[in-house]
Image: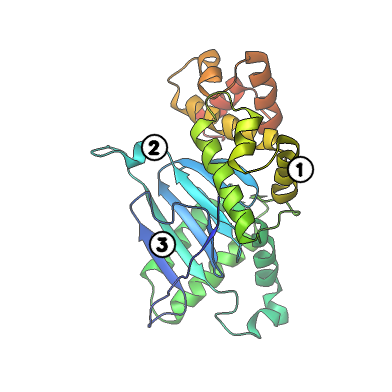
Amino acid sequence: MKPQLLKVSPGPAYSFSVRQDKVPYINNCWHYHAEVELIHFHKGSGTQFVGDNIKRFKANDIVLVGANLPHYWRYDDVYFQEQTPTSAFSTVVHFGEHFWGEVFLNLPENLPLKMVLEKAKRGILITGQAVEQVGKLIQRILLAEGPVRIMGLMECLLVIAETQEFTLLSSMGFQGSLSELESERINAIYDYTFKHFKGKIYLEEVAGIAGLAPNSFCRYFKTKTGKTYSQFLLELRVGYACKLLIEDRYSVKHLCYESGFNNFTCFHKNFKLITGSTPQSYQKQHRLGKV
């Protein structure tokens, strides 16, 4: 998936941007930008890509994405249907690392801010009690004017810096910069996989999409993404299985096949390996609000 370079305009009266998106297709592609992004999902769910990390996102998730880290949130198909009762809704803050001046982050008192922005280069999913606190601060920023707006952003980042409840998303070894040819190949691979992951994918077919021989394709994908294609495909399928478990429309054995697995034992093993839970435990934890 070719990451598109997007330019974020804060507007003439502001030093950074904050907006609300109420449609599912805003920046609905793999992209990156020089600005740090802080996003709060109020409504909607789908598949989240941050660097080389793939997982489900849902309402009330808050993510901090560092400068130039490729990312995108692909909302589920239901949000694109006409006359659907479901809706997508998020608040997004974009700011340059040095919008407050080149010297500011190097002040000794601002070390926590500098460190949290360094962590954000891998993407940070905020969890636990900090979610409610950061969510309220983001809404305060949206409504604020003048210096209060900047102070609200600083307070937001300090809460994230101080919390111990967070998940770093992308791996340390992920390299976001690709040549144009490499970007087009990754774009084609991701797009093809997302369209076909529910069925059998043959290595020769996906390698052909990339214009490579199967052996060369395997080496290429591992070098550029930090994981094997098989692992990438497993994570995509398990993420979709998580969605089906939450919806609770199928039996566990049925959703195994709906997610692209053709063997229940293989599904059960890989689900636990990737999520740390059995499918049944994952579903139970979600019902109790622990996922």
Q: In 3D space, how far apart are the residues under numbered discs 3 and 2 (Cα atoms)?
A: 28 Å
Return the residue at label 3. 139
Return the residue at label 1. 219
Disc 2, disc 1: CB below 8 Å?
A: no
- Mark before the other along the chain sequence, 2 or 1: 2
**Type of amino acid at the residue the image marks with label 1:** Arg
- SS label for mark 1: helix
Identified at 70% across, 57% down, the residue is: 175
- The image's mark for residue 77 is 2
At label 3, counting other C-alpha atoms closer than 10 Å, the crowd grade (few under 14, some 14-19, many 20 or more) is some
Residue 220 x/y as whole percent: 72, 46
Is residue 69 in sight in this rendering?
no
Q: In 3D space, how far apart are the residues under numbered discs 2 and 1 (Cα atoms)?
A: 32 Å
Pair 2/1: label in front = 1
Pair 3/1: label in front = 1
Q: Is residue 160 left or right of residue 28?
A: right
Identified at 44% across, 50% down, the residue is: 41
Residue 224 x/y as whole percent: 71, 50
**Type of amino acid at the residue the image marks with label 2:** Asp
